[in-house]
Amino acid sequence: METTENATSDHTEAATSANAITPQAARFRFPLPFDPIRLLAGILTRWPLILLGGCAFAVLGFFVGKAITRQTFSLSVSLIKLRVPQTVQTSEVGQAFRPADLNDSTLLATLLATEPRDNAFKIAANGIGPNQSSSRVEASQLENTDIFYITYHSPISADDAVRFTGIWSEEIREYTKRLQQSEARGVLSILSKEVVALEKRIEEINYEILAFAKVRNYIGGESQVAAVLGKITQIDLNLEDARSREKSLRAEVADLKEKIRNHSPLNLRLRQARDELADLRATYTDENPLVQSKLESIAYLEEQIALLDNDKNMNLESFTGSPLGNQLYLDMIAANSRLTEAVNQIANLQQQQESEKERLAEFPAIMTKYDELRSKRDAFTAELSLLSNRLKEAEIFASGSPGYFQVFQEPDLRNVSPSSLLQKPILLSAAGAVAGSLLAILVGLLLTQRSTTRSALECCAAAHAPLTVILPTESNLAHSYSNFWITSLSSLISHHQGPILFWTAGLDPQTEKVFWKELAAAAKKDTSMDLHVVDFSPDQLWQEEIPPKDLAWSTDLPEKRQSLILRCNAIPDAAGRDLLRSNHYWFTIVKAEKSSLDSLSTSRPLTRACFQVCSGCIVLKAPVVGKIRLLADHLSSFLTKRFS
């Protein structure tokens, strides 16, 4: 029996009708719409024609292969893969340049490159043109090794094979060298441009550093800062000294001013007038006109002296006239000159002090910018050094690349293998035999009459029901029907509480009559009772004929419907279809003929809409003729039971 999953799928198919009922049995499932075993048996029965066609074409293939066979001389040369050198490095910084380390698949492709192959054929001058060269060479790799093989199939001679393989292996070596050199030259061109660009950048940054140092008056280092600090300290000392000198000179000038005032002509005249007043008072009283006149002169002189003392911008020349006054005047001029020099020096030193302090305050920014420029130059210099080293490495490979291959075993005449003169004829003979057999099969299927008999497997596939029994149609009918009645149908009728339907839409009337006749005889023999069958079809099977004596045939349903057998080959009217929908057991009877399967397929939409899932398929089959067909029939029946 089929699985529950198949039963669920069949239920979905049965549910296309609005009144479909949940199926109680599984439908028969087969993945192909035909029986391949039956087709194979039909083909094998025509074996004389197949054998004749295969032999004819095999002979034809052998002679064609013999005619087109040309002996070749094959020679293989082994090449060992060279690893790219790992020690060609001109610096300890960075990763050294080296050509690409190609993988084995790429190297295998280079062995069949057109350039070395065509050059080798041109040098060998053996008459093989470029159009034929690709079919004469092969390349392979020894698994899990660095050994590669190049093979040449010479149509000329063994000496030609040895000569050409030697030339070809050398051309491959030179070709891989050129590959590495081409890669190195490409890198060399790029690195050269980068080196020139870096040198230009370094030159530009050097000019920028010089211009910055010139504008900022900075040559770098902390010594220049220390020099500015020392200069500021010296200026502070000189400023303190100049201020001390200014202070002493101002005191000296004030003292000289006081002295020169005491020795001025007005003071001399005042002292002289006072002396004269004293002399006059010794003779006269203060009321004397002479005394009064002298007092007025003294008062005038005192007034003038007071005016001179109050005048800050007094002219010192007013105090000259005496030898001492003149000397004091000269000393005063010299002291004022030194004082002016000291004041000017203080102002100059203060200006220098401010200038140097401003310069010192600018040093952090100057030093930062200067260090930044130098760092940039150092970075460019380091990059230039690295690229220069890579450039040297690229120049090494550009001038002398080792290539990817080295000849591991030189061509040897003793290793030349001549081709077989029978291999191609035998292969073409085998291919001809297969083609002749297939052609004979096709001709046999088209020109000979094909049987309309179908296998039990195809009957069950058309009915979508598992196999119940295979009954014969020609011989040994009584025994087969008796076994079917006893083993299957009798127990089902006894235990089933309801009618059992036999769907006979796939049978012709004559075959169906034989079925009911033999089934009734088997039932009579077993139960000693007539087989009661109700014909539930619009058209009656025994219309003008009398049913067999063991068969109770009627068209009316009895009131008691238990253990009732219904016969139906067409869908009845609406009233009768209700009984069909409630029927849980029904069997399809089909004859193993193409016409019967076609009729059954035509009625399947109706049974799917009105019936539940079919319980089984009863196959009426004539015996096959021939050992091949008999063996295929047994095998097909076995598969049918396995799928059921």
Image (cartoon, rainbow, N blue to C red):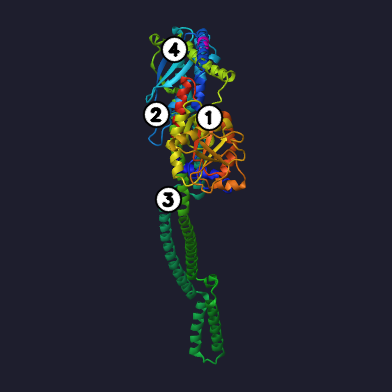
Q: Which residue is mark 1?
A: 592
The Cα atoms of the two marked residues, 3 and 2, are separated by 46 Å
Say whether disc 3 or disc 1 marks the residue closer to the N-terminus: 3
Q: Which residue is mark 4?
A: 74
Magenta region, main secondary structure:
helix
The location of residue 583, given as percent across then percent down, is 52, 45
Residue type marked 1: Ala
Image quadrant occupied by the C terminus = top left
Q: Which residue is mark 2?
A: 88
Range drawn in magenta: 56-60
- Magenta segment includes 184: no
- Crowding near the residue tagged with mark 1, few <14, some 14–19, many ≥20 C-alpha atoms within 10 Å: many
Secondary structure beneath disc 2? loop
Q: Nearer the viewer, residue 234 or 538?
A: 538
- Magenta segment includes 57: yes
The Cα atoms of the two marked residues, 4 and 3, are separated by 85 Å
Identify the residue at image location x=40%, y=19%: 79
Q: Which residue is mark 3?
A: 224
Q: Are marks 1 and 2 in contact (CB under 8 Å)?
A: no
The quarter of the picture where residue 441 lies is top right
Secondary structure beneath disc 4? strand
- Crowding near the residue tagged with mark 3, few <14, some 14–19, many ≥20 C-alpha atoms within 10 Å: some
